[in-house]
Amino acid sequence: MIIGESGSGKTTLLKCMVGLNEVDSGEVLFNGRNFYELDFKGKKEIRKEIGMLFQGGALFDSKNVEENVVFPLSMFTDMTETEKRDRANFCLQRVNLPNANNLYPSELSGGMKKRVAIARAIAVQPKYLFCDEPNSGLDPKTSIVIDNLIKEITDEYVITTVVITHDMNSVIEIGDNIMFIYKGDNWWQGSKQEILKTDNQEVCDFVYATKFMKDLKTKF
Amino acid sequence: MNIFFHFGQYYILMKRAFGKPEKRAIYRQRIFEEMNSLGIGSLGIVAIISVFMGAVITIQTAFNFESPLIPQYAVGVAVRDSMILEFSPAIVSLILAGKIGSSIASEIGTMRVTEQIDALEIMGINSAGYLILPKIIASVLFNPILIIFSMFLGILGGYVFGLMAGVVTDFDYILGITYEFRPFNVIYALIKTAVFAFLIASVPAYHGYYTKGGALEVGRSSTKGVVYTSVLILTFDLILTQVLLV
């Protein structure tokens, strides 16, 4: 998990990791392959292994839910129409959205959009899943549903998932390895147990910014 | 320097747009969808504008040709040549630049600011090719059909309204529109139309594709797309007329 204040560079880092932003220096390694040293074809191959959940869902407005999920399958597989539809239905059921195939993105709630985006991301069975603030704009209950879904999918498909968030509930719920970004730098790294015990001032200011977290700290 | 930057960026985008498609069948389907949305969807406005343009040209020309030395059939000649040489290809293209251009720029601009283009890129899809190429092909193939339709309706509109206004007779108008007809004029008009169609689809697409920000910037991209396309249509109208007719 990558956490940090707004404007600290989390999304920029994520975009560099998936190749949407060019990097000035450094390398992004996917199983030993440096993304930025690969040619166009090589980059394309890696991108096929990536699923991404965007902050707003980034569903295609002109396509309904089923067409959104089927889209990557149509572009990159030789599946028949029935096979694609079956796969889309399976993915939509997996994200607990079984009866929304014919709805358009404008007819979906924020949580539903995120779930369709997850279904689209897992449709092509990615090896890496990147999530940009999956809980932004969601109520606490739906946030937990999305968090759990990401965790379940990560474990079930044995994929590497990178989540960007500034929601401490998510960090505590699903975080394994946590990186704290501060003013564009990798300021702190550790587990979720360690982040609650760290005496790093900037990390503490972030983690215990809310009254709830402050009370939790005092209690334990 | 700004113009060189935009020209360079436009060239790079077009190079990407004309890259090898991921799946030809999907692109083919997209071309038909765009023909339906950009072409068929414009039939109504093209028909209305063409009929009224033809009618106005007929009445105005007849009003100005009062000299007994000018034969009556000259009205038909003027309407035919005006419609074929300039009004249908250039004016209708300008109208289409407004209608189609703003639609393309705002559609692609919205996709940019809502990260839909990023989503395409992440999937390993050439977003420029997937979004822009079908629009260009659909416009270049369908706009000539629209322009031929416009020529026909313009001349028909001139005939109907000319007769209704009593400024020209049936015989003189028919004689005029068939008098010394040069088929090359239609070819010239279609060449112009194809070039304008390329501009109508590609320039607003360029402005939409590089939109940064939110809803306000999408609106600005749309306006810029229409304005630059209109200026380029007029510029290329002059250049092509010089090259093909003079």
Image: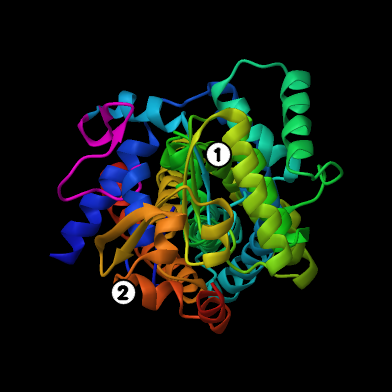
Rendering coords of residue B210 (x, y %):
37, 58
- One can see residue A92 in this view: yes
Dividing the picture into quarters, in which one does residue B233 lie?
bottom left
On the image, numbered disc 1 is attached to which residue? Answer: B138
Q: CA distance from mark 1 to mark 2?
A: 55 Å
Question: Given this view, does label 1 or label 2 mark the residue nearer the observer?
Answer: 2
On the image, numbered disc 2 is attached to which residue? Answer: A202
Query: Where is the C terminus of chain A found, in terms of image quarters?
Result: bottom right
Relative horizontal placement of residue B162, taking residue B191 as reference (left or right): right
Magenta residues: mostly which secondary structure?
Answer: loop
Range of magenta residues: A19-37
Residue A162 falls inside the magenta stretch: no
Q: Secondary structure at mark 2?
A: helix
Rendering coords of residue A40 (x, y %):
30, 29
Q: Residues within 10 Å of mark 2 (few under 14, many from 20)?
A: some
Residue depicted at x 51% and y 59%: A171
Mark sitting on residue A78? none
Rendering coords of residue A81 (x, y %):
74, 21
The one nearer the camera, A43 or B2, is A43
Residue A32 falls inside the magenta stretch: yes
The one nearer the camera, A200 or B245, is A200
Q: Is residue B13 above or below residue A30?
A: below
What residue type is disc 2 on? Glu
Residue depicted at x 39% and y 29%: A46
